[in-house]
Image (cartoon, grey):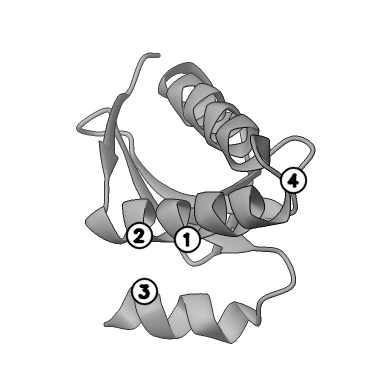
Protein backbone atom coordinates (compact mmCIF):
# COMPACT_ATOMS: atom_id res chain seq x y z
CA UNK A 1 0.00 0.00 0.00
CA UNK A 2 1.39 3.41 -0.97
CA UNK A 3 0.50 6.56 0.96
CA UNK A 4 0.61 10.24 0.04
CA UNK A 5 2.60 12.27 2.57
CA UNK A 6 1.34 15.63 3.84
CA UNK A 7 3.15 17.88 6.30
CA UNK A 8 1.81 20.06 9.06
CA UNK A 9 3.54 23.49 8.69
CA UNK A 10 4.65 23.24 12.34
CA UNK A 11 6.76 20.23 11.39
CA UNK A 12 8.95 22.51 9.26
CA UNK A 13 9.35 24.93 12.20
CA UNK A 14 10.53 22.00 14.34
CA UNK A 15 12.90 20.91 11.60
CA UNK A 16 14.47 24.35 11.10
CA UNK A 17 15.06 24.72 14.84
CA UNK A 18 16.75 21.31 15.06
CA UNK A 19 18.90 21.87 11.95
CA UNK A 20 20.03 25.27 13.26
CA UNK A 21 20.86 23.80 16.66
CA UNK A 22 22.96 21.00 15.12
CA UNK A 23 24.73 23.37 12.72
CA UNK A 24 25.65 25.60 15.68
CA UNK A 25 27.21 22.59 17.42
CA UNK A 26 29.17 21.35 14.40
CA UNK A 27 29.21 22.73 10.87
CA UNK A 28 27.49 20.28 8.56
CA UNK A 29 25.83 18.24 11.33
CA UNK A 30 22.51 20.00 10.77
CA UNK A 31 22.72 19.18 7.08
CA UNK A 32 23.28 15.49 7.88
CA UNK A 33 20.31 15.59 10.24
CA UNK A 34 18.14 17.23 7.55
CA UNK A 35 19.18 14.56 5.04
CA UNK A 36 18.22 11.76 7.48
CA UNK A 37 14.83 13.35 8.20
CA UNK A 38 14.07 13.81 4.48
CA UNK A 39 15.02 10.22 3.61
CA UNK A 40 13.14 8.67 6.49
CA UNK A 41 9.95 10.71 6.12
CA UNK A 42 9.91 9.88 2.40
CA UNK A 43 9.93 6.18 3.31
CA UNK A 44 6.69 6.67 5.23
CA UNK A 45 4.87 6.43 1.90
CA UNK A 46 5.49 2.67 2.00
CA UNK A 47 6.27 1.93 5.66
CA UNK A 48 3.88 4.11 7.68
CA UNK A 49 2.02 1.17 9.18
CA UNK A 50 5.20 -0.47 10.49
CA UNK A 51 5.44 1.93 13.43
CA UNK A 52 3.20 1.54 16.46
CA UNK A 53 0.57 3.96 17.68
CA UNK A 54 1.90 5.91 20.69
CA UNK A 55 -0.76 8.53 21.44
CA UNK A 56 -4.37 7.99 20.40
CA UNK A 57 -3.88 7.83 16.59
CA UNK A 58 -0.32 9.23 16.49
CA UNK A 59 2.55 6.98 15.42
CA UNK A 60 6.22 7.74 16.01
CA UNK A 61 9.24 6.99 13.88
CA UNK A 62 12.73 7.42 15.33
CA UNK A 63 15.32 9.29 13.27
CA UNK A 64 18.41 7.09 12.87
CA UNK A 65 21.49 8.32 14.77
CA UNK A 66 19.62 11.32 16.23
CA UNK A 67 17.41 11.55 19.32
CA UNK A 68 14.28 12.70 17.48
CA UNK A 69 10.88 11.22 16.75
CA UNK A 70 8.65 12.06 13.79
CA UNK A 71 5.02 12.12 14.93
CA UNK A 72 2.48 11.28 12.25
CA UNK A 73 -1.05 10.05 11.58
CA UNK A 74 -2.20 7.49 9.03
CA UNK A 75 -5.55 7.66 7.26
CA UNK A 76 -5.98 4.29 5.59
CA UNK A 77 -9.20 5.31 3.85
CA UNK A 78 -7.59 8.22 1.97
CA UNK A 79 -4.13 6.57 1.88
CA UNK A 80 -2.59 9.65 3.50
CA UNK A 81 0.18 10.08 6.05
CA UNK A 82 0.14 13.43 7.83
CA UNK A 83 3.48 14.28 9.41
CA UNK A 84 2.64 16.40 12.43
CA UNK A 85 5.79 17.13 14.40
CA UNK A 86 9.47 16.49 14.98
CA UNK A 87 10.25 16.18 18.71
CA UNK A 88 13.44 15.56 20.62
CA UNK A 89 13.13 12.40 22.70
CA UNK A 90 14.06 14.21 25.92
CA UNK A 91 11.08 16.57 25.67
CA UNK A 92 8.10 16.05 27.90
CA UNK A 93 5.43 14.07 25.98
CA UNK A 94 2.84 16.40 27.50
CA UNK A 95 4.15 19.13 25.19
CA UNK A 96 3.18 17.01 22.18
CA UNK A 97 -0.23 16.19 23.64
CA UNK A 98 -0.97 19.87 24.32
CA UNK A 99 0.16 20.84 20.82
CA UNK A 100 -1.96 18.11 19.20
CA UNK A 101 -5.04 19.47 20.94
CA UNK A 102 -4.49 23.09 19.83
- In this rendering, position of residue 48 left or right of residue 45: right
Q: Nearer the viewer, mark 3 or mark 2?
A: 2
Say which element carries label 2. Answer: helix
Sooner in the amino-acid sequence: mark 1 or mark 4: 1
In the image, is residue 91 above or below residue 28?
A: below
Residue 100 got which mark?
3
- In this rendering, position of residue 41 left or right of residue 89: left
The residues tagged by marks 1 and 2 sit, at their Cα atoms, a distance apart of: 6 Å
Q: At which x and y percent is residue 43?
A: 50, 20
The residues tagged by marks 3 and 4 sit, at their Cα atoms, a distance apart of: 23 Å
Residue identifier under label 2: 13
The residues tagged by marks 3 and 1 sit, at their Cα atoms, a distance apart of: 19 Å
The residues tagged by marks 1 and 4 sit, at their Cα atoms, a distance apart of: 14 Å
Q: At which x and y percent is residue 72?
A: 44, 49
Say which element carries label 3. Answer: helix
Sooner in the amino-acid sequence: mark 2 or mark 4: 2
Residue identifier under label 1: 17
Q: At which x and y percent is residue 77?
A: 24, 34
Q: Residue at x 32, y 81 (%)?
A: 101
Residue identifier under label 4: 66
Sooner in the amino-acid sequence: mark 3 or mark 1: 1
The residues tagged by marks 2 and 4 sit, at their Cα atoms, a distance apart of: 18 Å
Q: At which x and y percent is residue 39?
A: 53, 22
Say which element carries label 4. Answer: loop
Amino acid sequence: MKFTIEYNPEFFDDLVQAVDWYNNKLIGLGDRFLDKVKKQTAKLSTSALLFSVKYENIRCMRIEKFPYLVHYQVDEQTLTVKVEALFHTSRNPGVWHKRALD
